[in-house]
Image (tube, rainbow, N blue to C red):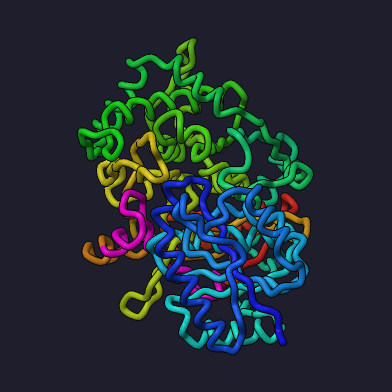
Amino acid sequence: MSSPVLIIASGDLRLSANRVCWPAQQQAEEAVCAAIRQLGRQVERAHPIDPTKQHGFIDSQAYGMRVFRNIPEDAPLVVVEAVWQYSHHVLAGLTTHKGPILTVANWSGQWPGLVGLLNLNASLTKAGVRYSSLWSADFTDDFFLIGLKRWLNGEAVTHDLSHVKPLDPAALPADARELGAKLAAQLKRDKAIIGVFDEGCMGMYNAIIPDELLHPTGVFKERLSQSALAAAMSTVTDAEAQAVRTWLDQRGMQFKFGPTPETDLTPEQVHEQCKMYVAAVRIAADFGCDAIGIQYQQGLKDTCAASDLVEGMLNNPDRPPVFSASGEELYKGQAVTHFNEVDECAGLDGLVTNRVWTAMGLDPSNTLHDVRYGEAYNGQFVWVFEISGAAPASHFIGGYAGAIGERQPPMYFPRGGASMKGVSKPGEIVWSRVYVEDGKLKADIGRGGVVELPEAETQRRWQITTPQWPIMHAVTYGVSRDQLMAKHKSNHVQVAYAPDAATADQALAAKAAMFAGLGLEVNCCGL
């Protein structure tokens, strides 16, 4: 008789998030268990629901290790995710598990289950762990059931990856190839620094680039402390912070304020964010950083208002001026590239994008987004790319005048702070992702477009995801929903605009060439 299939669930570290999201997780688990039983197998949960905590997630690395001590090493194991999860909670156990592993997520925008799945898959890929993966809206469709049956029969679940082609540098336009090679040689010769404000945000093992892989690209880490950022904020004067706020007000940015700090955005929270912005630029300049990443969601979340408004300003060359003690304007006319959640893969990508776009005379504003959700609209699949921070106002319809600051959700952000919310403008984009696989740095790159949906549809998509966050209605050219899910090795995707399709094609070619010149293995997706 076949051994029972065991189910585990990795969750957030934050009790508030785990409690709020637990009902959706229960619903997903019940549906997955029903499908497994329908196919004739027994299924059991490998860890209990805690009545005190009011959820059944593995909510720490230590607890995950204890859970795995009681899991037979050859048991068939399903990781079900309907929420954002910290991959390191279960990574230790999964790296030594000898039985088949299947990761599963619900196709829903309610909580970031798809985001959690993609992060776990990317972390397993980096760690060299073999796994299969599936996703479904209700776990009754043929795509899911056929894949599940194969996995239960001891087969690996495979997906269509015909959209992926290794880069052939010789096939690139000569001028783009030459520009990319020139910029890569310059970076490797002159070198650059990415400032990392505390490494390893939210268990994202996939987002840490080992130094020995990063250094050959010419990029080195300056390891900074978020406590230093908090200390630097205390040296920023109220007048300096007010100058940042006044600049935003004059550009037309709106803030939705309320009276209760625990649930509403307040002017004091935004004032604190303006101090963080000034402090971050000054620290970046003091250490000669070409890009910086603030972890925030652990540590600073209990100390000060959110970093997200700050990140959006930093990623835009058109931003409030910041001056040194001697009166020099820092990074004048330049973006201070910021990688949200200290995702170092996004940091390297953002740095490369900045160099290529600037050399081409284009607006280098770029950001990462979560691959959050997606649905068909009028026969075309349109992704919901959405992130709490880092999106610059230059990406929005109306720019700063189209940006709104809303209070970050209390279950993630107890100290509040404004997001920089907006609807991404229609246009042509280049998307990409740097990741680690087989002990190598790699990059996937492709083309896409941002479409404008009716206001009612935008609002509907916001309400079924996170309405406080900026949204991009994205189409990935030549790459279907399931192809992106199967191949993408991150919860994050990097995006940058170009003024037209021809220029976007040229920018993609130059960026691919620069990646290759830095030693990355590059895949062209959908091209």
The furthest residue to the front: 51
Is residue 467 on the magenta stretch?
A: yes
**Residue pushed farthest top?**
326
Q: Can residue 176 be seen in this view?
A: no
Residue 18's place in the image compared with 31, above or below, is above
Tell me: residue 165, above or below residue 294. below
Relative to the observer, which residue lies in front, 174 or 203?
203
| Quarter location, residue 151 | bottom right
Residues in magenta, as a range: 460-485
Q: Where is residue 369 in the image (x, y as percent from the top left)?
A: 47, 54
Image x and y of residue 53, in percent:
47, 50
- 77 magenta-colored: no
Residue 464, given in percent of the width and then of the height, sits at 32, 62
* Residue under the image location 32 percent in, 30 percent down: 270
> Which image quadrant: the N terminus?
bottom right
Q: In the figure, is residue 513 to the left or right of 143?
A: right
Name the residue located 63 percent from the left edge and 39 percent from the top edge.
199
Can residue 512 be seen here? The reply is: yes
Query: Does 418 sit left or right of 179 as displayed?
Result: left
Residue 163 sits in quarter: bottom right
Q: Determine whether 351 is above or below 31 in the image.
A: above
> Which residue is found at the position 27% from the left and 26% from the top?
246
501 or 101: nearer the viewer: 101
Q: Is residue 299 left or right of residue 522?
A: left
The quarter of the image holding the C terminus is: bottom right
The number of numbered badges drawn on the structure is 0
Q: Nearer the viewer, residue 175 or 193?
A: 193
386 vs 87, left or right, is: left
Determine the image quadrant of residue 443: bottom right
Residue pictured at 28% horizontal, 40% vertical:
263
Q: Position of residue 302 (x, y in %)?
A: 45, 32
In the displayed structure, would residue 522 be above or below residue 412?
below
